[in-house]
Image: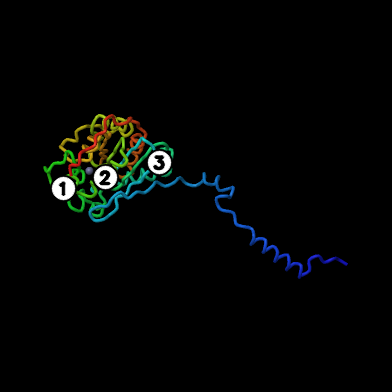
Amino acid sequence: MPIRLLTPATTRLLAGLLLLICCLIPAPALAQLPWQADDLNLLPPATPAEYVFGYSVEGRPLTAYIFGEGANVTMIFGAFHNNEPASAAVVDLLREYLTIHPEEWAGRTIILVPVSNPDGVAAQSRLNARGVDLNRNFPDTWSRTALAVRYNPGPRPASEPETRAIMQLVARFAPAKIVSLHQPFHCLNWNGARGRALAEEMSAHNGYTTTGDIGYPTPGSFGTYSERLGIAMVTLEMPIDEVEVCWQQNREALLAAIRTELGPVSQPRVLAKTF
Ligand SMILES: [Zn+2]
């Protein structure tokens, strides 16, 4: 006659004991799980830090995307003028590219501002909501003289909140290099000797001509302002072309600008508060 080791009563007793044991074992903290550290290497790279550094006339946020850290700081701006559609789009494509290529920002800081004039986006306008050309509103070389309404410099230097926010962003991060994207002149317009060196480095990758003279005066421009701070400044003027064409032309040139090390500014100049 077989011996029944597990009577119904014994089974119920064992099941109850098992349940009790399971409840008494503390759940391990997630950080202690041995597989987690290895699996972290499989995660996508961290997205850039998103930094709202100011607001437009109509209250729209001015957003910077900050990759990496290090003394070699590059700032890249798009869409000062929203009638130049490839400008913001190319900076956005660069943002996507950098997000999946962390090797490009190892040991250096890259700050991208795809849209510098957010109020002009909806209106597809060169100007901000008060009809000011932000690229003529910077202090130091600002002038009341305007050739046309499209170059309206505003009532005084840095009168616009977008201009002041960009100045504060530049002061905070002290970039060695700035590239500002525009259309349609198909050239690299540099400011100062350091800007010229940066433009020539970029030209080796996109084939654009370099020039220190865009052909007309630009008082109050971001370029002249940055030059006087000792920053290597290049206005990248893309041609009128499809966004994808502009991106393919300029991806390597922008990466070269990021990689270039021009050394510290010898005598950084702090502009007097003239606004
Ligand atoms: Zn422009």
Hey, what amino acid is under mark 3? Gly
Residue that label 3 marks: 68
How much space separates mark 1 and mark 3, taking CA atoms? 35 Å
Residue 12 percent location from the top left of the image? 73, 68
Looking at this view, is 242 or 153 the one in front? 153
Rendered location of residue 144, percent (x, y): 12, 43
Q: Do callouts 1 and 2 mark residues in contact (Cβ within 8 Å)?
A: no
Res 18 → quadrant: bottom right
Residue drawn at 67 percent across, 64 percent down: 20
Answer left or right for 137 relative to 173.
left
Res. 38 image quadrant: top right
- The secondary element bearing badge 2 is classed as helix
Q: Residue furthest bottom?
A: 9
196 lies above or below 159:
above
- Name the amino acid, label 1: Gly
Residue at image mark 2: 166
Quarter of the image where one finds residue 68: top left
Classify 10 Å Cα crowding around label 3: few (below 14), some (14-19), many (20 and above).
some
Residue 138, given in percent of the width and then of the height, sits at 20, 42
Label 1 near ligand 1 (CB < 8 Å): no
Label 1 sits on residue = 154
114 lies above or below 26: above
Label 1 neighbour load within 10 Å: few <14, some 14-19, many 20+: many
First reached walking from the N terminus: tag 1 or tag 3: 3
Q: Residues within 10 Å of mark 2 (few under 14, many from 20)?
A: many
Q: Look at the image and tell me in which quarter the N terminus lies.
A: bottom right
Q: Quadrant of ligand 1?
A: top left
Residue drawn 78% across and 69% down? Answer: 7
Whether residue 126 sits left or right of residue 9 in the image: it is left
- Coordinates of residue 213 in the picture (x, y in percent): 19, 33
Lower position in the chain sequence, tag 1 or tag 2: 1
Tag 1 secondary structure: loop
